[in-house]
Amino acid sequence: MADHLQEALGPLLRAARARLEAVVDSPDLDARLIVEHFSGTTRTQAIADPMRTVDARAIAEIDAALKRRISGESVHRILGYREFYGLRLSLSPETLEPRPDTETLVDAVLPFAKATASREGACRILDLGTGSGAIALALLSAVPEVIATGVDVSDGALATASRNAEQLGFASRFKVLKSDWFAKVSGRYHVIAANPPYIPSEDIENLQDEVRDFDPRLALDGGVDGLGPYRIIAAEAAGFLEAEGRVAVEFGHTQRNEVTEVFSAAGYKLAGAFRDLGGNDRVLVFEL
């Protein structure tokens, strides 16, 4: 494919799909995303004008991207962005790729954030392990009175989250803080939200290639039993929570009982439990 100086869009798409067919779950979609992104074309153009020519530089970039996809890298890491809650978020090697399951956490917090904002005039949110900023930025986009702080231990993640806030026009309501969990946090928040690392250390080798080899290990490894971060949050969140505030956490779909027990032991009551689109237990909301 890279040998041609120019190639028509329709045959280029078919060739890309054929290369991915045997190795990825969604060859049609991935081929289309890669070809459209690097050729600067749209799906409509591919249908209406399949003989439109694509130049040699774009063909070389498409070829390189397909090789990365075949090696196991996710299509969104290759493109450098992912849609989350209707927002386009830039990714970097230091950020977890936000998944649709995490939108469940945004939905779980939203009614409380709206009610708090209308009552108090503002809703302060602390997003622990913010990564790309996905959770905080989705809430900022949905509720104009939300003010959020994104905490992460990774400089690269914080730079990515800041860039996303800037690109989306939320920079005035979003700040980042380098902190190992609550170590450098100050003030009180109406919502403390987290999608913490929750994979038990020994299970990481069994994850899908695109997660194991390309998502940052720091954002996956939850310690021996996968519950380490929940213990930290349950032990320390109360000191940073407004009266009647909420703590919302995402977790692995088999961990509901264990996470509930960690928070119950720290004096929290369950305020809500939510399932993702696949019907799996995914988010718990606690109050003191």
Image (cartoon, rainbow, N blue to C red):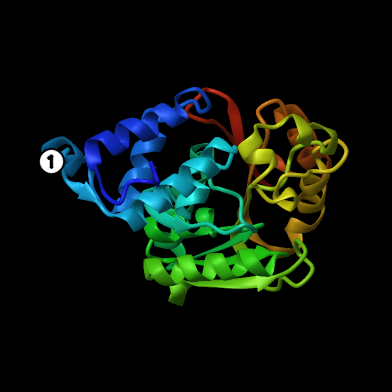
Q: Exactly how many numbered labels are in the figure?
A: 1
Identify the residue at image location x=35%, y=49%.
59
**13 up-or-down from 181: above or below:** above
Residue occupied by mark 1: 49
In the rendered image, the quadrant that contains the N terminus is top left
| Type of the residue with mark 1 | Asp
Can residue 188 be spotted in the picture? no
Q: Position of residue 134 (x, y in %)?
A: 51, 54
Graded by Cα atoms within 10 Å as few (under 14), some (14 to 19) or many (20 or more), the crowding at tag 1 reads few
Closer to the camera, 98 or 36? 36
Q: Secondary structure at mark 1?
A: loop
Closer to the camera, 17 or 198? 17
**174 up-or-down from 237: above or below:** below
Identify the residue at image location x=54%, y=44%.
68
Q: Is residue 176 left or right of residue 123?
A: right
Can residue 18 be spotted in the picture? yes
Identify the residue at image location x=44%, y=30%.
19
Name of the residue lying farthest toward the bottom: 172
Q: Is residue 200 left or right of residue 11?
A: right
Q: Position of residue 258 (x, y in %)?
A: 78, 31
Q: Is residue 84 left or right of residue 197?
A: left
Q: Position of residue 178 (x, y in %)?
A: 70, 71
Identify the residue at image location x=42%, y=53%.
61
Name of the residue lying farthest toward the left: 48
Q: Position of residue 260 (x, y in %)?
A: 74, 34
Closer to the camera, 203 or 133? 203
Name of the residue lying farthest toward the right: 224
**57 up-or-down from 277: above or below:** below
Which corner quadrant of the image does residue 181 belong to?
A: bottom right
Which corner quadrant of the image does residue 35 belong to?
A: top left
Which corner quadrant of the image does residue 237 belong to?
A: bottom right
Q: Is residue 75 left or right of residue 130?
A: left
